[in-house]
Image (tube, helix red, strand yellow):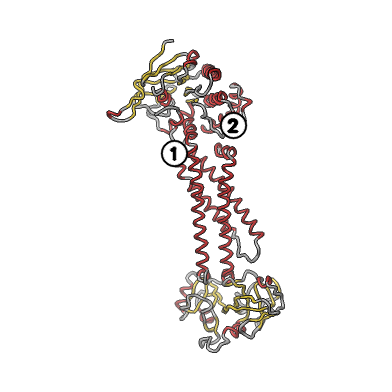
């Protein structure tokens, strides 16, 4: 690092510029990863944060919760399967609500639960749902941004029902919409208002959330029960409408950024190495080994990348801090660390072509007029 | 014992009818404290001779002994070690590392041989003082004059306390006064430290400072009678 550090110090401008490019790339990588995470959270945080290991859907509905219908009687069947420690019913409906003064429409996902089950949301303000809560609801705090307060009545459009907001929860969105938690009978009243919409199922629910410590519980449930399709919670998340597409797009952008980072550094250091080949010749004539020169080059790239990535990450957290609440942006520290390491590795890989060049440089270059 | 010995050294390039002889049956001995100049027109093989004596290039035939050790069959890595510990190079101008301050140019040699410590740091400072460069300690090469650069190169060559000092056209970019100063310093340092020194030059003005002059013509070496 003797040479590496002194050269960085001497040619500050040159390295600040390339470090700046690296920093911007790192910044973009982290912003995108934050956006990916934010979108994923926005899309299905209710599912992501659900204390369930598997979800039982109706079979042949492509794991779409809004299409799935199961009779409540399946709940006991699920509970009876060996390995299932707990299970809870879940109802789902996309609704449009109007606040009490009737001015603003808010789209939401209604999730119906048994208030005493493990699906009950953590209340951060107000009260939790009671067992026979009737027309009461715990809603995601996003509603606050629309001016909804505790005690407000929300009208459910295309029905004659209203719910009273008795509590707020956090981190509960589904299909990019904030969640309204109600009990199951109330949900059934709205969901199956039209005659025949329950397809003749007694006491219908959408799906069943399952808790289990056992591997392969999904296969077990699929085997033991008829007319159901059971998947792990993660698979259910992947199958949310639009989830794969959103993640796919961002993943592709991230992949390109990693490749670009590698190329930018590779080209920069290659050109620099070509420029310095006479210098490397002198160093080799003095007795420097290729491995010594290689270590210095790698050290330089490592240092430059590290500083750029750290600055990029710092800027990302700064942006996250001033980002308005509506933007789906959530930084995951673990992901930031992983992407930093990938960026570092990728930049080191970019250095490889320069290493080959250094290995080829002949100390003879240093002597004036040898053929 | 001679510090530097070349015995029947030849260097040829190419095969068959295209064979070019850069050196033919060259023999020379340089003793400790002796300062030898090699002169000759360009293309005569001077630089090839220096490269072979300096373990930069391997000869096609003959033997090269540095401090009594035959380096003819050494691997490239081992030759680098020889250069690092036993040979001091003074190359043509602009062969200092551009981003190193004067003191670091010297410390680099210690760094390369893995001996950078307090002792070598003291040694570097002492060399700078002895060569009148103390006031240029923290200057980059771009801020040094041509003569100063060559003095730094001399200091650098002495840094690893080599057995042999090889200078390749050290006065190439200097005017007569500066060139003379540099060569005088080189002679003085080589002699006082008991080094075997070889200087390749076509600068005939400096020859009176040397103990012996050898002339290179078409790959052959002859002693020139003073």
Label 2's element? loop
Residue placed furthest toward the bottom: A195
Report x, y in % for residue B126.
Answer: 60, 24
Q: Mark 1 points at which residue?
A: A359
Q: Name the residue under label 2.
A: B140
Mark 1 nearby-residue class (10 Å; few <14, some 14–19, many ≥20): some
Residue B218, by quadrant, is: top left
Residue A42, by quadrant, is: bottom right
Report x, y in % for residue A191.
Answer: 57, 83
B21 sits left or right of A303 in the view? left
The answer to whether residue B166 is above or below residue A212 is above
Tag 2 near tag 1, CB within 8 Å: no
Report x, y in % for residue B201.
Answer: 46, 20
Can residue A148 be seen from the camera position used here? yes
Residue in the picture at 56% in, 35% down: B99
In the rendered image, which quarter contains the C terminus of chain A?
top left
Separation of residues labelled 2 and 1 (CA atoms): 27 Å
In the rendered image, which quarter contains the N terminus of chain A?
top right
Label 2 resides on the chain identified as B
Mark 2 nearby-residue class (10 Å; few <14, some 14–19, many ≥20): many
């Amino acid at each position: 690092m003797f040479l590496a550090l002194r050269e960085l110090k001497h040619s500050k401008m040159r390295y600040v510029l390339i470090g700046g490019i690296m920093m911007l790339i790192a910044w973009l990588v982290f912003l995108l990863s934050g956006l990916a995470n934010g979108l994923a959270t926005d899309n299905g945080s209710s599912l992501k944060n659900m204390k369930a290991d598997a979800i039982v859907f109706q079979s042949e509905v492509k794991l779409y919760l809004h299409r799935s219908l199961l009779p409540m009687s399946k709940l006991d069947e699920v509970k009876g399967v060996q390995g299932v420690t707990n299970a809870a019913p879940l109802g789902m409906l996309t609704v449009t609500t109007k606040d009490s003064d009737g001015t603003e429409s808010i789209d939401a996902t209604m999730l119906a639960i048994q208030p005493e089950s493990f699906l009950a949301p953590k209340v951060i303000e107000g009260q939790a749902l009671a067992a026979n809560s009737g027309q009461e609801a715990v809603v995601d705090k996003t509603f606050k941004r629309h001016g909804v307060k505790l005690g407000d009545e929300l009208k459910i459009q295309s029905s004659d029902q209203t719910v009273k907001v008795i509590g707020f929860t956090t981190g509960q969105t589904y299909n990019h919409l904030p969640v309204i938690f109600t009990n199951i009978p109330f949900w059934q009243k709205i969901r199956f208002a039209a005659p025949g919409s329950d397809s003749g199922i007694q006491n219908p629910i959408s799906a069943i959330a399952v808790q289990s410590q056992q591997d392969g519980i999904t296969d077990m449930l699929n085997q033991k029960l008829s007319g159901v399709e059971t998947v792990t919670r993660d698979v259910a998340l992947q199958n949310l409408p639009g989830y794969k597409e959103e993640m796919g797009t961002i993943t592709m952008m991230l992949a390109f950024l990693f490749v670009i980072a590698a190329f930018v550094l590779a080209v920069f250091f290659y050109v620099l190495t070509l420029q310095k080949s006479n210098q490397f010749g002198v160093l080799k004539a003095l007795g420097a080994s290729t491995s010594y020169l290689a270590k210095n080059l790698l050290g330089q790239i490592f240092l430059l990348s590290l500083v750029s990535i750290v600055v990029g990450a710092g800027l990302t957290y700064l942006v996250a801090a001033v980002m308005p609440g509506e933007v789906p942006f959530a930084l995951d520290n673990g992901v930031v660390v992983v992407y930093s390491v990938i960026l570092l590795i990728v930049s080191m890989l970019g250095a490889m072509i320069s290493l080959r060049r250094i290995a080829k440089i002949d100390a003879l270059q240093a002597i004036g007029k040898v053929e | 014992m001679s510090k530097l010995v070349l015995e029947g050294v030849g260097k040829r390039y190419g095969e068959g009818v295209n064979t070019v002889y850069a050196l033919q049956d060259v023999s020379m001995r340089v003793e400790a404290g002796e300062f030898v100049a090699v002169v000759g027109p360009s293309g005569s093989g001077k630089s090839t001779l220096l490269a072979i004596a300096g373990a930069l290039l391997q000869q096609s035939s003959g033997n090269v002994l540095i401090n009594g050790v035959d380096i003819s069959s050494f691997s490239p890595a081992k030759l680098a070690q020889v250069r690092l510990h036993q040979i001091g190079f003074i190359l043509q101008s602009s062969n200092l590392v551009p981003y190193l301050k004067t003191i670091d140019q010297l410390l680099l040699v210690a760094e390369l041989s893995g001996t950078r410590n307090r002792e070598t740091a003291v040694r570097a400072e002492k060399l700078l003082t002895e060569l009148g460069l103390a006031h240029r300690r923290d200057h980059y090469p771009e801020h040094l004059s041509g003569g100063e650069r060559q003095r730094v190169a001399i200091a650098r060559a002495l840094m690893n306390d080599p057995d042999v000092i090889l200078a390749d056209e050290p006065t190439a970019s200097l005017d007569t006064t500066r060139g003379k100063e540099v060569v005088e310093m080189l002679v003085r340092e080589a002699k006082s430290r008991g080094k075997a020194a070889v200087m390749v030059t076509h600068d005939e003005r400096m020859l009176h400072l040397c103990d012996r002059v050898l002339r290179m013509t078409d790959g052959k070496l002859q002693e020139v009678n003073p």
